[in-house]
Amino acid sequence: MKKLSFKLLSLMLVSSTIFYSCSGNDTEETEEVTEEVTISAEEEVSYVLPSPLQIVNLFKNAGLEYVGGLTNAKENVNNYNAKTGQKINFGIYAADMAYAITNNQTQESINYLNALRQMSEKIWMTDVFNSVGVAERLEKNVGNEDSLTTIMADLQMEMDEYLDENGASYTGSVIFAGAWIESMYLALNANKNNNEKLTNRLSEQSVIVSNIIGAVKQANEEGDLDGLIANLETINNSFKAINETTGVLTTEQVEGLKTTVTEIRNNLIKG
């Protein structure tokens, strides 16, 4: 079995986010992004995935605004009984919390962190939340965006370590797929004025989705991820028509991608 490393993918998202905050030049930012993903033949599988917070920050720095009512309802936590759906929606809620945090929606951030804690019980990751003292830290940091961001970053780190130590690294790729789909859904549906910079960042996701597909395929030993892979490949097909001259989605292509991602995402949150 091959080892698919997401370390460079993580660095790609981080460098793009940081570079954008320092420069308004889209051309230079695009050049900063590397498309390389390392694949090496080894027995073990290991992923270093970017956090949902990094993904949302990438879009936020390009002009993504907050639109209420887009995120997955917290009450839906009780609807997810199948293991694959639980992992996917854990990722979806993580992206929703990141969206709330980056837009100073404190109460929403806390609500989604609590939703994640409930979801962690379903996928046997309660220890992750206990180890970072989520409940206690929430009470002490209400209204503090920086602290909420730190809590989320700590959760991501603990989750990565937990999955790795328990031989469940593949779970991370499924969670990340859910977070990525939700982030795309939010960016596409909140992009009301066809923001050019945001469209550029959305266009760059064509590189990332193909890597996610490869990771999820590696995790699909029992065939329980066939549906998720099919959904990701459908999204990937929407990117294949990208403008070959500029490498950026046209307005019509963005609308097509929006329709595709929204339909897939809405089906995923049904449970």
Image (spheres, grey):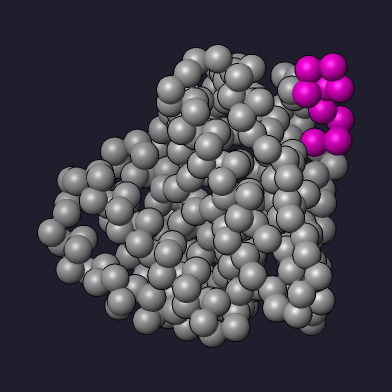
**Of residues 27 and 257, the one drawn nearer to the viewer in this rendering:** 27
Location of the N terminus by quadrant is bottom right
Question: Is residue 207 shown left or right of residue 22?
Answer: right
Location of the C terminus by quadrant is bottom right
Question: Is residue 61 shown left or right of residue 182?
Answer: left
Instruction: Name the residue: 61% across, 29% down.
Output: 32
Compared with 87, 37 (above or below) is above
Provide the major secondary structure of the magenta segment.
loop
Image coordinates of residue 116 in percent, x first then y, are: 41, 66
Image coordinates of residue 86 in percent, x first then y, are: 56, 71
Image coordinates of residue 123 in percent, x first then y, are: 51, 79
Instruction: Name the residue: 66% across, 43% down.
Output: 262
Compared with 65, 214 (above or below) is below
Instruction: Name the residue: 60% across, 83% down.
Output: 167
Image coordinates of residue 18 in percent, x first then y, are: 46, 33
The reply to whether residue 193 is visible in this rendering is yes
Q: Which residues are magenta?
A: 239-247
Asked if the magenta segment contains residue 242, the reply would be: yes
Taking the view exactly as shown, the residue that stands out farthest to the left is 140
Instruction: Name the residue: 61% across, 74% down.
Output: 169
Kindly indicate the quadrant of the structure image that contains residue 248.
top right
The reply to whether residue 69 is visible in this rendering is no
